[in-house]
Image (cartoon, rainbow, N blue to C red):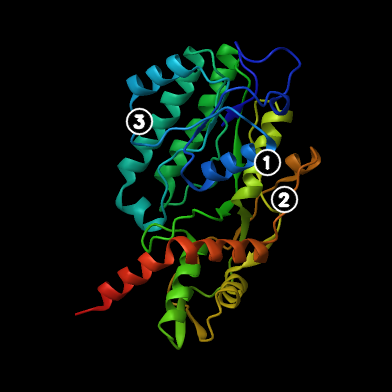
């Protein structure tokens, strides 16, 4: 969810990209999406970025968020903070996922309005409410409607961006909390280190999925902040599909694992196809730049340099009697 301009924002006719000295609050700058947004803004020459660690600002606390906005009064806010996780985490902590995400969105949107700041722009996951993801999805759909309500009632220039499946540096590689792509990278990497003869992957490999590098999402968010203003949300996807089987083969090649892939067809495949219609943002002139294989190479390099050692140690300790 997001906005460019506000009730007390930049002068009429100015754009986000022409306002690079303005104070921009990037909420969630330490995560996958927020860190990519921060990198993109720095590369574009923004000079007054405002960030806070979770230990410094608890976005689930309304008094803390209100005080922060009244003190700092950022002109623009990009909300990339959220409680996220994979299937295991969503299933185990449904109350936490819906409650924390509703609190974060409501507190930030409300405080931005009261402080005279615009509504933030955020990467929102939406779509059919699958049982394993429904608590997160309900909270994020509510966030989209919250932005629309503030636009209709208070005239705030609020927009929402909904990305497809994301990946990239600073992704979550936890064995229980990660999504399919970082999970595959981790499993093939550990199998390579252990010289394992095979890696078992759930399902038939037939389902089709779409992936977008997080740096492309950051570029799209900046694009929308500068050029888009309407009630409806905007899908942000790559427009390219790949089967889980082909994805696993690509990951195996990128990692350098030489064993075989065994498909466990007794496990569920999930939804056969998930492809976003991103024709709206494409018609506005935006398109992704990072090919999936190139993005995987970069992501795997980041994983090896930043997280792989810890995961290898955990794997060894768990395998000991």
Sooner in the amino-acid sequence: mark 2 or mark 1: 1
Query: Which quadrant of the figure contains the N terminus?
Result: top right
Q: Residue at horizontal 77%, vertical 43%?
A: 282
Outermost residue toward the left in this view? 321
Q: Which residue is mark 2?
A: 288
Taking depth in this image into account, of 251 and 46 the one nearest to the observer is 46
Q: Secondary structure at mark 3?
A: loop
Query: Which quadrant of the figure contains the C terminus?
Result: bottom left
Q: Residues within 10 Å of mark 2 (few under 14, many from 20)?
A: some
> Does residue 62 lie above or below 52 as drawn?
above
Question: In the image, which disc is placed on residue 279?
Answer: none
Q: Are marks 2 and 1 in contact (CB under 8 Å)?
A: yes
Q: Which residue is mark 3?
A: 60
> Does residue 71 lie above or below 132 as drawn?
above
Q: Residue at horizontal 65%, vertical 54%?
A: 275
The Cα–Cα distance between marks 1 and 3, rounded to whole angstroms, is: 27 Å
> How far across and down, in percent of the image, does residue 175 sit?
38, 64
Name the side, left or right, on which 42 lies relative to 96.
Answer: right
The Cα–Cα distance between marks 2 and 3, rounded to whole angstroms, is: 33 Å
Sooner in the amino-acid sequence: mark 2 or mark 3: 3
Name the side, left or right, on which 194 lies relative to 317.
Answer: right
Can residue 52 be seen here? The reply is: yes
Q: Which residue is mark 1?
A: 220
Taking depth in this image into account, of 187 and 126 the one nearest to the observer is 187
> How far across and down, in percent of the image, does residue 35 sit?
53, 44
Q: Residues within 10 Å of mark 3 (few under 14, many from 20)?
A: many
Q: Are marks 1 and 3 in contact (CB under 8 Å)?
A: no
> Does residue 37 lie above or below 145 as drawn?
below
Q: Secondary structure at mark 1?
A: helix
């Amino acid at each position: 969810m997001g906005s460019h301009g506000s009730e007390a924002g930049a002068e009429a006719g100015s754009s986000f990209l022409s306002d690079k000295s303005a104070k921009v609050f990037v909420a969630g700058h330490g995560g996958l999406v927020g860190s990519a947004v921060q990198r993109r803004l720095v590369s574009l020459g923004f000079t007054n970025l405002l960030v806070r660690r979770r230990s410094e600002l608890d976005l689930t606390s309304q008094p803390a968020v209100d005080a922060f906005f009244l003190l700092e009064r950022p002109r623009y806010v990009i909300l990339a903070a959220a409680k996220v996780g994979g299937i295991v985490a969503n299933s185990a902590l449904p109350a936490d996922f819906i409650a924390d995400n509703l609190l974060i969105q409501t507190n930030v949107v409300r405080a931005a309005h009261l402080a005279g700041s615009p509504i933030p722009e955020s990467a929102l996951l939406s779509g059919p409410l699958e049982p394993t993801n429904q608590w997160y999805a309900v909270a994020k759909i509510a966030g989209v409607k919250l932005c629309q309500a503030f636009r209709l009632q208070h005239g705030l220039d609020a927009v929402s961006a909904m990305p497809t499946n994301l990946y990239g540096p600073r992704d979550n590689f936890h064995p229980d909390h990660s999504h399919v792509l970082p999970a595959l990278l981790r499993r093939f990497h550990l199998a390579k280190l252990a010289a394992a003869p095979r890696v078992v992957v759930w399902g038939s490999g037939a389902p089709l999925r779409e992936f977008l590098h997080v740096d492309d999402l950051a570029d799209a968010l900046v694009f929308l902040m500068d050029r888009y203003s309407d009630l409806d949300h905007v899908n942000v996807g790559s427009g390219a599909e790949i089967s889980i089987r082909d994805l696993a083969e690509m990951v195996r090649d990128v990692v350098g694992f030489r064993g075989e892939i065994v498909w466990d067809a007794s496990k569920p495949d999930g939804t056969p196809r998930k492809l976003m219609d991103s024709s709206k943002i494409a018609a506005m002139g935006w398109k992704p730049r990072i090919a999936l294989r190139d993005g995987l190479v970069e992501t795997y390099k980041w994983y090896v340099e930043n997280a792989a050692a810890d995961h290898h140690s955990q794997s060894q300790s768990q395998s000991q009697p």
